[in-house]
Image: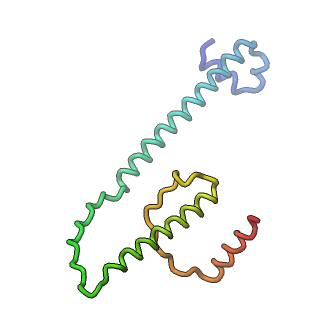
């Protein structure tokens, strides 16, 4: 009995009862490998389609803009103000690093702060949500 005949008999519930144990096992293995093969083929086709879509929809890489030449500092700007802001920035980085290190219980050596920028004020409902989340952690 060929595999196609066996699968045809497996389709009819009445003839399944007449099959031997070896025929049932062979038919189940064929059905298993056939199902896995179709699934694997469908996943490969899906991967190719996603890869093609990624190529067609990818945005072109932009060239970085050339940095402008440094402007001359005005004569009225005192040199002391730059050292004060650097100290303030270092202190701000230290405070943020300490806060980040305490949250997930990680070492401060694992945290790298690349950029600090001020975000505009949040709406009242946003502040209330943040306060609610912070209070629920205690």
Pinpoint residue 113: horizontal percent, then vertical percent. Answer: 47, 61
Residue 108 in which image quadrant: bottom right
How many numbered discs, if any? 0
Q: In this view, does 28 lie above or below 129?
A: above
Pinpoint residue 102: horizontal percent, then vertical percent. Answer: 63, 59
Left or right of 77 on screen, residue 104: right
Q: In this view, does 93 lie above or below 129?
A: above
Q: Which of 62 and 126 is in front in this view?
A: 126
At 54% from the left and 66% from the top, the residue drawn is 96
Name the image colouring.
rainbow
Residue 124 in which image quadrant: bottom right
Give the farthest residue toward the bottom: 76
Q: Nearer the viewer, residue 26 or 49?
A: 49
At 46% from the left and 40% from the top, the residue drawn is 45
Q: Quadrant of the N terminus?
A: top right
Pinpoint residue 8: horizontal percent, then vertical percent. Answer: 65, 23
Q: Quadrant of the C terminus?
A: bottom right
Pinpoint residue 60: horizontal percent, then vertical percent. Answer: 30, 58
At 60% from the left and 17% from the top, the residue drawn is 3
At 31% from the left and 79% from the top, the residue drawn is 79
Q: Nearer the viewer, residue 14 or 25?
A: 25
Give the farthest residue toward the front: 80
């Amino acid at each position: 009995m060929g595999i196609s005949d066996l699968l045809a008999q497996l389709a009819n519930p009445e003839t399944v009862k007449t099959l031997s144990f070896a025929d049932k096992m062979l038919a189940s293995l064929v059905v298993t490998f056939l199902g896995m093969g179709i699934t694997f083929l469908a996943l490969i086709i899906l991967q190719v389609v996603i890869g093609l879509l990624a190529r067609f929809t990818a945005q072109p890489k932009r060239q970085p803009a050339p940095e402008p030449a440094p402007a001359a500092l005005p004569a009225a700007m005192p040199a002391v103000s730059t050292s004060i802001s650097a100290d303030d920035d270092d202190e701000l980085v230290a405070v943020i690093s300490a806060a980040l290190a305490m949250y997930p219980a990680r070492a401060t050596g694992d945290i790298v702060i690349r950029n600090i920028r001020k975000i505009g004020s949040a709406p009242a409902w946003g502040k209330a949500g943040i306060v609610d989340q912070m209070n629920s952690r205690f």
